[in-house]
């Protein structure tokens, strides 16, 4: 980002409006003190807010770094999202879905329960058993929610793979999860064009022979291949299936889902979330941070393919009985006011989106939102990357009309729920700060040795107490789980991988990743993943990939590439390499620049120093480079980078 601190915004503070405070779900700041005094008692009280088939014996068993929450308790996530709400008011709208082409579908809670139960029966018919991992590869259509909840209903953990991933990326995740059933669709719309989803599946599955069945939603009716014996239409299965399915009583610590995310190596990590703690954590954070009320129309613009969609489209809001908006397509289709059109049309009261989207809206200009009646909005949220004060203020003024509190929510795939955020009826917010840990959560800013940093000084973000929805392990790789998160300091202290500092009020200011993860438009991408795809291209010898600050996307990908001898780099090859990454990972991982070079900054032992490359890409001081094999390479790369701009 070009702007880290906006001088005018630096001292700005926004107190929540009086009438918001008066009506807020939580408006007594004593909640922080109480939760801090006895965090287990606090979480136990919150656990009473959801429904259990059997109560727990123990709130927490903590053998660092392994936590078990609500041990002995039995519950079902889909029961909490559906049956519990049908009992209160089955005719309430659960989902308002809008397709990119303008089609609208609505589901009441009763209808969603029937559809989910039908599909749960389908899964059983197909031989899926409790504990089997089911892969879901669907775009933002209602069937993605139905499929997730159906898995939860029968105790089969889901692994949702973001629809824009390539077939190869899908295959990597299927193989790691040892999943033999995939749920997908024929195609979907993106900016008016058809994305041929089933074709991507067919390509991916060529190298994934374990997959037995592919269930295909007919969404667009585009021409596809159905392989006999493997591929089955969703609607055929649903027609033949019964509308009632008893929810499985799951142990609190049974796996609810796997969510793959990027880390510092090429292989994505399967983050394991379990049932009880995750449901308690997402339920209560959704209720308090988004201040969910019975008449709210809540729109989270994330995709169910990422953790934000899991926690704050599906499990958190639905377990609160909220009416959610889901939108299939792009924010600028057919025009740049699509979001504001949706807010106006469906009378959204809460909007939760990403800084990268907000910065695009800023660039497109104030006139787009100004054309629409946004007066129903009462609360705004931000997630996915740091929000710079300029974007915060624009959001506050142009979308919130100075009236709506903004919750800047910090969290991760691994944390499952928001850990640092304002409570909109309590917290005075400051643009650019996610403010304070949620009640019961304890966080700190530490140096490499685990000492607390004084206010104003940069350090590393740590979570210093267990929380209910924390990652339990990395699927099939317990060693990596411990090394990645629990060995930076000690086994009681979670290393988030983000840089942070405190201000004089104890507010957290989070600056972004300090490891080899890049957040491109809020999408989490590992540098090593992109590098390994680049070096798989025949003419590439080596590649070093780093994030470069970008005004809109937060970060973009710069790839420094050494070609095999005898091959010279030209624009055509650059295009081919960009295309190669796009088709092997997904279009969102496209490098912005490919820079050919004869050498990369390496240590004497031959390791690429991404820190130095990153400084070069960002036009920053590279610091001490005397330990490099060949310090002269730095100037050469600086020159080449400038030539590319
Ligand atoms: C970044 C997304 C600053 C951070 C929910 C984190 C943020 C990574 C914020 C996790 C925020 C998310 N302020 N940075 N409010 N929210 N991040 O796993 O770098 O896709 O580590 O989860 O996003 O990305 P993930």
Image: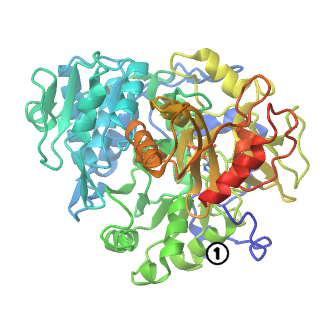
> Does 217 sit left or right of 96 as displayed?
left
Is the residue 272 above or below the residue 318 in the image? above
The reply to whether the residue tagged 1 has its Cβ within 8 angstroms of ligand 1 is: no
Residue 294 lies, in percent from the top left, at 41, 59
Residues 243 and 4: in front is 4
Q: Quadrant of residue 167?
A: top left
Residue located 80% across and 42% down the image = 632
Residue 170 point in image, percent of width and height: 37, 31
Name the outermost residue toward the front: 566
Asked whether the viewer can see residue 385, the reply is yes
Q: Number of labelled discs?
A: 1
Residue 443, image quadrant: top right
Q: Position of residue 464 (x, y in %)?
A: 76, 34
How many C-alpha atoms fall within 10 Å of the one at disc 1: few (<14), some, or many (≥20)?
Answer: few
Left or right position of 413 against 317:
right
Q: Quadrant of residue 516?
A: top right
- Against 346, is 630 above or below? above
Name the secondary structure under disc 1: helix
Residue toward you, 519 or 27: 519
Color style of the picture: rainbow
Across and down, in percent, residue 96 comes to 29, 58
Quarter of the picture containing the N terminus is bottom right
Left or right: 456 with respect to 23? right
Observer-nearest residue: 530 or 327? 530
Q: Residue at x 36, y 26 (%)?
A: 171
Q: Is residue 61 visible?
A: no
Q: Is residue 436 above or below residue 240?
A: below
The quarter of the image holding the C terminus is bottom right
Residue tagged by mark 1? 18
């Amino acid at each position: 980002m070009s702007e880290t601190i906006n001088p005018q915004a630096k001292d700005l503070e926004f107190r929540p409006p009086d009438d918001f405070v008066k009506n807020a779900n939580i408006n007594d700041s004593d909640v922080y003190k109480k939760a801090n005094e006895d965090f287990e008692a606090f979480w136990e009280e919150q656990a009473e807010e959801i429904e259990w088939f059997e109560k727990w014996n123990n709130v927490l068993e903590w053998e660092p770094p392994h936590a078990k929450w609500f041990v002995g308790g039995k519950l079902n996530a889909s029961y909490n999202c559906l049956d519990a709400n049908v009992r209160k008011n089955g005719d309430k709208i659960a989902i308002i879905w809008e397709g990119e082409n303008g089609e609208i579908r609505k589901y009441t809670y009763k209808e969603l329960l029937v559809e989910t139960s039908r599909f749960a029966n389908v899964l059983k018919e197909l031989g899926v058993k409790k504990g089997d991992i089911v892969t879901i590869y669907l775009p933002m259509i209602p069937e993605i929610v139905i499929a997730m909840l159906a898995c939860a209903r029968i105790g089969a953990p889901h692994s949702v793979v973001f629809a824009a991933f390539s077939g190869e990326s899908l295959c990597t995740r299927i193989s790691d999860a040892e999943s033999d059933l995939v749920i997908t669709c024929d195609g979907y719309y993106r900016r008016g064009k058809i994305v041929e989803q089933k074709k991507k599946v067919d390509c991916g599955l060529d190298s994934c022979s374990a997959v037995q069945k592919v269930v295909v939603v007919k969404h667009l009716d585009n021409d596809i291949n159905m392989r006999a014996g493997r591929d089955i239409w969703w609607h055929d299965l649903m027609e033949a299936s019964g509308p009632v399915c008893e929810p499985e009583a799951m142990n609190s610590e049974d796996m609810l889902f796997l969510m793959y995310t990027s880390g510092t190596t090429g292989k994505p990590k399967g983050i394991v979330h379990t049932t009880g703690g995750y449901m308690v954590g997402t339920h209560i954070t959704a209720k308090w941070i988004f201040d969910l009320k019975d008449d709210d129309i809540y729109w989270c613009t994330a995709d169910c393919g990422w953790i934000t969609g899991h926690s704050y489209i599906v499990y958190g809001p639905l377990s609160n009985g909220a009416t959610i908006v889901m939108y299939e397509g792009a924010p600028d289709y057919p025009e740049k006011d699509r979001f504001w059109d949706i807010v106006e049309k469906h009378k959204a009261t809460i909007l939760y989106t990403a800084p990268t989207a907000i910065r695009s809206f800023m660039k497109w200009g104030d006139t787009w939102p100004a054309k629409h009646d946004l007066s129903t909005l009462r609360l705004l949220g931000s997630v996915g990357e740091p929000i710079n004060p300029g974007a915060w203020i624009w959001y506050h003024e142009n979308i919130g009309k100075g009236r709506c509190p903004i919750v800047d929510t910090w969290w991760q795939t691994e944390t499952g729920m928001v850990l640092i955020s304002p409570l909109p009826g309590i917290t005075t917010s400051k643009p650019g700060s996610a403010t304070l840990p949620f009640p019961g959560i304890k966080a700190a800013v530490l140096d490499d040795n685990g000492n607390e940093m004084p206010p104003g000084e940069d350090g590393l973000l740590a979570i210093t107490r267990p929380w209910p929805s924390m990652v339990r392990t990395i699927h099939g790789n317990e060693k990596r789980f411990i090394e990645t998160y629990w060995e930076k300091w000690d086994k009681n202290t979670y290393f988030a991988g983000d840089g942070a500092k405190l201000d004089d009020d104890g507010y957290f200011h989070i600056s972004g990743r300090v490891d080899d993860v890049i957040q491109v438009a809020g999408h989490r991408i590992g540098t090593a993943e992109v590098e390994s795809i680049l070096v798989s291209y025949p003419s590439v010898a080596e590649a070093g990939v780093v994030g470069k600050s970008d005004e809109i996307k937060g970060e973009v990908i710069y790839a420094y590439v050494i070609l095999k001898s005898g091959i010279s780099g030209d624009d055509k090859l650059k295009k081919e390499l960009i295309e190669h990454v796009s088709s092997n990972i997904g279009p969102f991982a496209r490098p912005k620049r490919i820079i050919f070079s004869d050498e990369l900054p390496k240590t004497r032992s031959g390791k690429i120093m991404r820190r130095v490359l990153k400084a070069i890409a960002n036009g920053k001081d590279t610091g001490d480079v005397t330990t490099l094999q060949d310090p002269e390479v730095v100037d050469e790369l600086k020159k080449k980078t400038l030539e590319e701009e």
